[in-house]
Amino acid sequence: MYRIAVLPCDGIGPEVVDEGLKVLDTAAKIYGVEYETTTYDIGGDRFLKTGEVLPSSVLKELREMDALYLGAVGHADVPAGILEKGILLKLRFELDQYINLRPIKLYPGVETPLKDKGPADIDFVVVRENTEGLYAGVGGTLRKGTEHEVATQEAIYTRRGVERCIRYAFELAKTRDEKKLTMVDKSNVLTYGHDLWVRTFAAVGEEYVDIATDHAYVDACCMWMVKNPEWFDVIVTCNMFGDIITDLGAMIQGGMGVAASGNINPNGVSMFEPIHGSAPKYTGQNVICPVAAIAAAGMMMEHLGEAECGQAIDRAVAAALASGKLGDLSTRSGVSTTKAGDMVAGLVE
């Protein structure tokens, strides 16, 4: 019996989570997966009522779960950064979810803005370090608000943090057909931290002689993701660059509506979510595409070791998209959130 914490949070988060749970329930019944869910009301509304973002009592309970399933974070009436840092970053750091895993996969039937590219060309995974770098929050201000103000933001890299991320990426590459790993950095400019990445990548790579390795500067990586996405199989990179290139990846795979992610602690509690935001102006309108949230539920099952269940969800997503019945996946598609969820659930084998 898996214990899953459900964190619908803000905006359209509850709507897409409902559809993800609908599809998960269908697949779990077919494949004999037993689970129970506990829903937590953290998010913007709770903050506005109580001043609490992520209470220590809730965090304590989340530590005991098998997985977390999150909708979206961001509230129009809460200043930017409060919820993002207080929920997303805090969970990643407190639960040591040191891998952000982002499949960049173009499903059949989904349009990409890349000319002459199809599903065979766009099928790779980005492994983003998730708890260090510029997101460590180290820095400060001096003489704030004056003409002599100074602001610093430091990127923190540790050998342990870099190595475990790179090792995870090599292990992932072993499971894929192409068995190729590309490290993305900016070591020609960011001398010290990225020199650590380069040396660690080379050292760990000596243990994986069956994996082909490659290197790209982040600006060149962005260019090649657009020009030649088929060059990539698995990419490993730091926190900031991973954040940037995965949004580019979402666009070439058809948009935010189909992009799912996992925040992974291989030996602890991991969290799964669509990468899109809370889209508050569409809240309650039943017009948001839930595919990314459904795909995130599939990722969660695979991570928990229920590969057949997770892969069945992925096949159902692929079948629904290939059918063309989900329209262009936009808010103007004419396909409601609930109808899209029903369609995917009906395609689970």
Image (cartoon, rainbow, N blue to C red):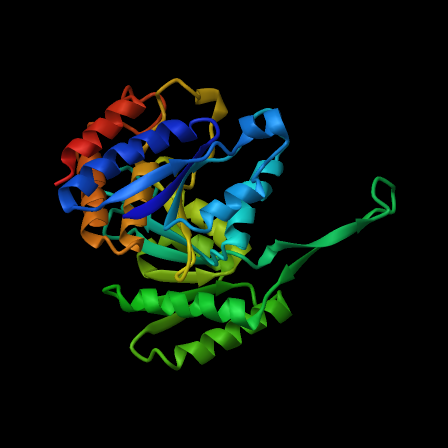
Q: Position of residue 29 (x, y in %)?
A: 17, 40
- Can the viewer see residue 233 in this picture? yes
Q: In this view of the protein, which residue sits in the foreground, 59 or 27? A: 59
Q: Is residue 182 above or below residue 274?
A: below
**Measuring 39% from the left and 82% from the top, which residue is drawn there?**
206
Q: Position of residue 134 (x, y in %)?
A: 61, 55
**Measuring 45% from the left and 65% from the top, which residue is drawn there?**
165
Q: Position of residue 170 (x, y in %)?
A: 36, 69
Q: As drawn, is 36 to the left or to the right of 165?
A: left
Q: Position of residue 289 (x, y in %)?
A: 33, 29
**Measuring 30% from the left and 31% from the top, which residue is drawn there?**
19
- Can the viewer see residue 252 in this picture? no
Residue 72 falls in image quadrant: top left
Q: In this view of the protein, which residue sits in the foreground, 101 or 105? A: 101
Q: In this view of the protein, which residue sits in the foreground, 331 or 309? A: 309
Q: In this view of the protein, which residue sits in the foreground, 204 or 3? A: 3
Q: Is residue 88 above or below residue 257?
A: below
**Image quadrant in which the C terminus is located:** top left
Q: As drawn, is 135 to the left or to the right of 224?
A: right
Residue 214 falls in image quadrant: bottom left
